Image (cartoon, coloured by chain):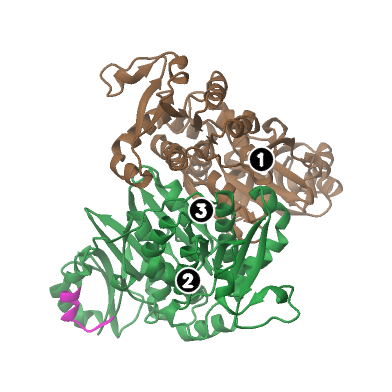
Chain colours: A brown, B green
Amino acid sequence: MMKVSVLGYGTVGSGVVEIIRENKELITKRTGEEIQVKSILDLRDFPGDPVQDIIVHDFEEIKNDSEVQIVIETMGGLHPAYEFVKASLESGKSVCTSNKALVAAYGPELLETAQDKNVNFLFEASVGGGIPIIRPLKVSLAPDEILEISGILNGTTNYILTEMTEKGADFDSVLKDAQEKGYAEKDPTADIEGHDACRKIAILTSLAYGKQLDFEDIYTEGITKITDRDINYAKKLGAKIKIFGSSRKVGDRVAAMVAPKLITSSHPLYSVDGVFNAILVKGNMVGDVMFYGQGAGKLATASAVVSDVIEETKHSNVHMKTLWEHEKLNLMPLDEVTSKFFVRVHGGREEVEKEVAAAFGKVTPVDVGYTDEFGFVTEEMTEGAYGKAADALSVINKIRFDA
Amino acid sequence: MMKVSVLGYGTVGSGVVEIIRENKELITKRTGEEIQVKSILDLRDFPGDPVQDIIVHDFEEIKNDSEVQIVIETMGGLHPAYEFVKASLESGKSVCTSNKALVAAYGPELLETAQDKNVNFLFEASVGGGIPIIRPLKVSLAPDEILEISGILNGTTNYILTEMTEKGADFDSVLKDAQEKGYAEKDPTADIEGHDACRKIAILTSLAYGKQLDFEDIYTEGITKITDRDINYAKKLGAKIKIFGSSRKVGDRVAAMVAPKLITSSHPLYSVDGVFNAILVKGNMVGDVMFYGQGAGKLATASAVVSDVIEETKHSNVHMKTLWEHEKLNLMPLDEVTSKFFVRVHGGREEVEKEVAAAFGKVTPVDVGYTDEFGFVTEEMTEGAYGKAADALSVINKIRFDA
């Protein structure tokens, strides 16, 4: 019997308890041992809920419970999640978490503590919800040098962009609709500004290269500037706009970014629509590998947490080394990163075409019939060169073009 | 230093050696230990090859080498692969294999031997080439009851069907082209008749339910009957023809099959074209999860083998339990399995419409302009009922319609 405690009986935490209860028989069979939720930490009581008798309000009770070998952290946020996780590891308990903020900020430290104590810090659910990606990246792709990671890592923004594309609706009304359907939070900032995707690509990139990539260092651009006009240009280009968390190896440095991109139908993630997430990983031996599924949602995310709990139960007392050092990853300055850019500038084509040519050299015009602006695609250039060229013009919006 | 031996220096075996050599530095870092290929068993010599000095011709040398802790089996075929793998496990060495025939035929027995000897029998590369699927199914999806597995599991047939669809070419000329490009074997039987996919879905289904599904018991239909006319009907239906290895849970039984199917654009595997493979797994908690990548090829497959070698090196002396018992899986008789069918019968529509209605009841005609035959889609029905209804008609071809 493996006894576990859950910190936080919210969406994911209650999902974890539900899965352990509903799939108990098969989990016991596959694990070779029964998993029992002994206690749940929450500030609230849950009268009438089957868990009402195992709710505790004081973390110390869990920390000091020597029967509890695994702590499941599903509170979210940095504090007190960090303090509770650290204390759990230090008291010799393994921790499984769904908390991307915690992992992005304290990954190497908590892995080190786990190693010191010969326990494990596992975080499959921190990226991609129910999609297996952390374990495949750590284990299945271990033979490969990772050349590139491109992820549609946030279901809310992918849903919004999909709806804008399919229904021709504007950003604000789709956001409102997404909030009503529960696909977007009341305060959607973390999603629509790319902060959520940023933490996820920071985690994946750090794991891929074994060194710390601070999420604060990653250039991050959200989707709030995308309008129906951008969508119309995208269609004209045979492209879709999707927001990517991405990183790629360039010599001995890594370029990383969160930003909307135009991709065409030859891109493996072109058909990943709605609330689904997908992550493409390119290895120097295995080539392109893609993982797809529900990037969020109570039971999908909880399933990923429980997979960690099962693995830990099967291998308790065995530390599984994860390479993610404190040393900082050698990040390429944004100015040196290259791509093509789709750009819209104020003014009709006749009016501004010469200025555009003077600033950008050769460009490919994209005409969807607007007379008050001029849209075009640049050649491949660095972000630095783009910035200088754009300075001379009155830019409405620009979107990187991955084609 | 972990010393390993490779059985068979063919395509995959030489790929394994290449990856261990080329990515040595990062593999050592991630593993925490260097992996060294100590010997390679092959009937041939390889003068001038860097491995010429470590080639051995007698398996006993490897079996009796107490320094060798992991045996990598990439010979293929059942014999002597089975005898060598069994003897390796019995002498306390873990085995990593890419051999689907071996795993499908002897999986439970070899896992049992591994358990008895406290070593491991790992076979990530046996299904899906470079796509991580065995480990995700065993570990990441362990919390879930598996409701369905649908796989495009054979790159050769997917390439042929893709070319037929995109170029309007006929089966024979595409097969010939595929053979010239090295995408199809000289003797393509195992691929085009579905035998390869059959072994793969047998392995995945056995792992999903923890019981043995004999590949001989799975209804298997290849792609040799598919013609350009079928492709034209598919296009009219907004569908593509792909050959699936699939299984799904129906009550306490499992329905399994290898057969071409018509799928429409709402199917997650619709856009998996060319030599790529993809596997969709539906869990009762996680929902749909999809894995995509190169299903074959020297380095992709070898990367999967090396991932097993790395995992085994990190956890040597720890048996990782895999649930796959000798007990037979409760397979649903084919006659009871249901689907819709797209059917073509001899004779013009006016001529045969009444007979078709008498046999099948309500059907949906599909008209692409052929006057000498009549194509239609049935309602959902059992295979048994289909067989009886079809008996009364002169059927040219039928393809299951997954929509």
- The image shows residue B237 at horizontal and vertical percentages of 37, 66
Q: Is residue B62 left or right of residue B201?
A: right
A281 with respect to B320 (left or right): right
- The mark closer to the camera, 2 or 3, is 2
Q: Is residue A70 above or below residue B81?
A: above
Of the pair A5 and A365, the residue shown nearer to us: A5
Q: Secondary structure at mark 1?
A: helix
Residue under mark 2: which chain is it in?
B
Q: Which residues are magenta?
A: B387-396
Amino acid type of the residue tagged 1 in the rendering = Ser
Q: Is residue B372 above or below residue A381?
A: below
Residue underneath mark 3: A271
Q: Which mark is residue B88?
A: none
Q: Are marks 1 and 2 on the same chain?
A: no
Q: CA distance from mark 1 to mark 3?
A: 27 Å
The answer to whether the residues at label 1 and label 2 have Cβ atoms under 8 Å apart is no
- Residue A270 visible here: no
Callout 2 amino acid: Asn
Question: How crowded is the residue under tag 2: few (<14 C-alpha within 10 Å), some, or many (20+)?
Answer: many
Above/below status of A61 relative to B96: above
Q: Quadrant of residue B376?
A: bottom left
Quarter of the image that includes the N terminus of chain A: top left
CA–CA distance in space, label 2 to label 3: 19 Å
Q: Chain of mark 3?
A: A
User: Residue at 74% across / 47% down in the picture?
Assistant: A349
In the image, is residue B295 part of the stretch drawn in magenta?
A: no
| Pointer 1 chain | A
Q: Which mark is residue B158?
A: 2
Q: Which residue is mark 1?
A: A206
Answer left or right for B17 relative to B242.
right
User: Please, what is the three-letter code of the amino acid marked with disc 3?
Assistant: Ser
Q: Secondary structure at mark 2?
A: helix
